[in-house]
Image (cartoon, rainbow, N blue to C red):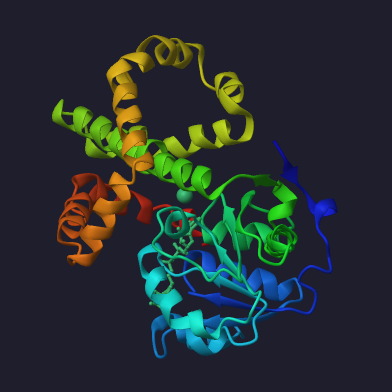
Amino acid sequence: MRIYSAKDVDAKALKGATIAILGYGSQGRAHALNLKDSGYHVVVGLRRGGDSWAKAKKDGLRVAEPAEAVKGAALVALLTPDLSQPGVYAEIKGNLAKGATLLFAHGFNVHFRQIKPRKDLDVVLIAPKGPGDLVRRQYQQGRGVPCLVAVAQNATGKAKAKALAYAHGIGGTRGGVLETTFEEETVTDLFGEQVVLCGGATELVVKGFETLVEAGYKPEAAYYECLHELKLIVDLLHEGGLAKMHQFISETAKYGDLTRGPRIVTRSTKAEMKKILKEIQSGKFARQWIRENKTGKKKYQKLLNQDLKHPIEKVGRALRARMPWLEQGR
Ligand code: NAD
Ligand code: MG
């Protein structure tokens, strides 16, 4: 296993290069601004007239349409939403310089063969393990979100050196850049967000909230207990693992954790996790999501609306309004 840091970066790999960042959302904005501050020529590729266009201009960046932006770029980062990327690649393909580097922040399209890059290109992955606003904020604080690096095509023999220089430019070498493959990044990223980080965590919060409210307890008390406090626990886990959390919670909380936790996440929960992992590995999840996207995202919209209409959202908005500092730094 290798974790790269600043000393592993070849400063010449992207020296004087123009880097095209396609997309100016969560990751795109953070990468573009960090790379600019690290001394690179950055051009942002966007659809003309969209909201992001005005935002990137206002941030002082050069903006052009994707097919124009990639002309003369030594490295092109594809940071539009995953399912839009095959279309964007089709637009830019003819204008990519020979031997240019195509960079992804998630392996989905290469691993599931939605994009088959030209053979003369280097194809690399730099996947920050955190949302874009943190990639930007930590860079400004002299810190860095850790990243994963992988190489899918090494046409020039310098693919990894360029990927590491890019990771360095966005601040990733400060936290460390872990060597992986497109397959491992894609599978573990999808698994993490479905089972633990997004799907698992929110479902646990909402079901806990419902249980207390249905038993007659105040929604406000249930909100504090099941949602608000989660961050405090997660911060302890993030800083020092299970040991640090155990150090800071009460003896009573610890006894409850050890005896009740396994009754909530049971053997059958783990069996379901394994099923979800298989659906990701076999491509079943990817096919389903691509089909849903092609047919107008009706089911996705319906589920999303249901989520946003949940009573926990209403009580949460009211309570958060009393704590305006929660939104600071965004
Ligand atoms: P996003 O949804 O926040 O931003 C999308 C941007 O792309 C917007 O600026 C939008 O205007 C632009 N865009 C959309 N369609 C376009 C098109 N057809 N042509 C040109 N521009 C277009 O995206 P994101 O969440 O930053 O995701 C970008 C990539 O980063 C994805 O591969 C994602 O998997 C990966 N990633 C995201 C995160 C995260 O925290 N959001 C973390 C790690 C990796
Ligand atoms: Mg992720």
User: Which image quarter holds the N terminus?
Assistant: top right
Residue 103 is drawn in which quadrant?
A: bottom right
How many marks overall? 0
Q: Is residue 84 above or below residue 211?
A: below
Judge left or right: residue 289 versus residue 43. Answer: left
Q: Residue at x 17, y 65 (%)?
A: 295
Furthest toward the front, the residue is: 119
Measuring from the top left, give residue 71's x and y in whole percent.
59, 87
Judge left or right: residue 228 versus residue 7. Answer: left
Residue 192 is drawn in which quadrant?
A: top left
Q: Is residue 160 above or below residue 178?
A: below
Relative to the observer, which residue lies in front, 147 or 84? 84
Measuring from the top left, give residue 181's x and y in whole percent.
57, 46
Asked if one can make out residue 222 in the rendered structure from this viewpoint, the answer is: yes
Relative to the observer, which residue lies in front, 108 or 79? 108
Q: Residue at x 52, y 64 (%)?
A: 27
Q: Residue at x 48, y 65 (%)?
A: 26
Q: Is residue 12 above or below residue 256?
A: below
Asked if one can make out residue 58 in the rendered structure from this viewpoint, the answer is: no
Measuring from the top left, give residue 63's x and y in whole percent.
54, 88
Q: Is residue 64 above or below residue 36?
A: below
Judge left or right: residue 110 versus residue 1. Answer: left
Measuring from the top left, give residue 171's x and y in whole percent.
70, 59
Q: Residue at x 74, y 57 (%)?
A: 142
